[in-house]
Amino acid sequence: MILLVTVPPGREGDGILELEWALEKVRVKGTDWRGVLLAETPLSKLEALERLKNFETQAIQRVVPLERLVPARWEDIEKAVLELGKKIEGTFAVRAKVRGTKRLSQRELEVRLGSLLVERYSLKVNLGDPDYTVLVEVLGKKAGIGLVRGKDVLRFEVVD
């Protein structure tokens, strides 16, 4: 399981320590973006999120579970999204965040990938309250792809 974790800029060290305490088995790497960490753990998505949910954090702001990391190229992102699309039962939305590249646009990713899933699997889009959200997190040359349900993305209030 791969987790994209955000912390206040400058608090990356605290975030890494908290992830290590909460998850125990985890490898955390900083990224080229202040406040953005990537964590890999052998724990299941359910177990990792449950442990973090019950952890009293001082630095972690957001935890986004990702299924895989692929090169940040259209064809690789499309392939990964189509694989995850097979698991969608019900409505969906695509949400993208692009950091560090001008080749991919957030809006274009959301529209093109959403259209692709509708065409391929005859799925219904619901932007307001989808059963599933396909997440695309572009970090320069890599893109994290995830498929989440409502409460799978954790958000914490962090006081500086």
Image (cartoon, grey):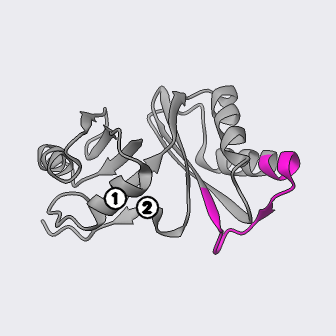
Circles 2 and 1: CB distance less than 8 Å? Answer: yes
Q: Tell me what residue is drawn at x 47 percent, y 68 percent.
A: 151
Whether 121 is among the magenta residues is: yes
Residue that label 2 marks: 153
- Residue 56: x and y, percent? 16, 67
Q: Residues within 10 Å of mark 1 (few under 14, many from 20)?
A: some
Q: Tell me what residue is drawn at x 36 percent, y 55 percent.
A: 47
Q: Secondary structure at mark 2?
A: loop
Using the image, tell me which numbered label, if any, was put on residue 130: none
- Residue 149: x and y, percent? 55, 63
Magenta part of the chain: 117-133
Residue that label 1 marks: 62
The answer to whether 31 appears left or right of 76 in the picture is left
Q: Secondary structure at mark 1?
A: strand
User: Which amino acid, mark 2?
Assistant: Val
Pick the residue in front: 92 or 11. 92
Image height of 97 relative to 154, above or below: above
Pick the residue in front: 148 or 100. 148
Viewport quadrant of the N terminus: top left
Image height of 87 relative to 82, above or below: below
Q: Tell me what residue is drawn at x 72 percent, y 40 percent.
A: 82
Whether 63 is among the magenta residues is: no
> Separation of disc 2 and disc 1 at Cα?
7 Å
- Residue 71: x and y, percent? 54, 25
Q: Tell me what residue is drawn at x 23 percent, y 49 percent.
A: 23
Is tag 2's residue or tag 1's residue first in the polypeptide sequence? 1
Pick the residue in front: 160 or 25. 25
The answer to whether 19 appears left or right of 140 in the picture is left
Q: Residues within 10 Å of mark 2 (few under 14, many from 20)?
A: some
- Residue 155: x and y, percent? 35, 66
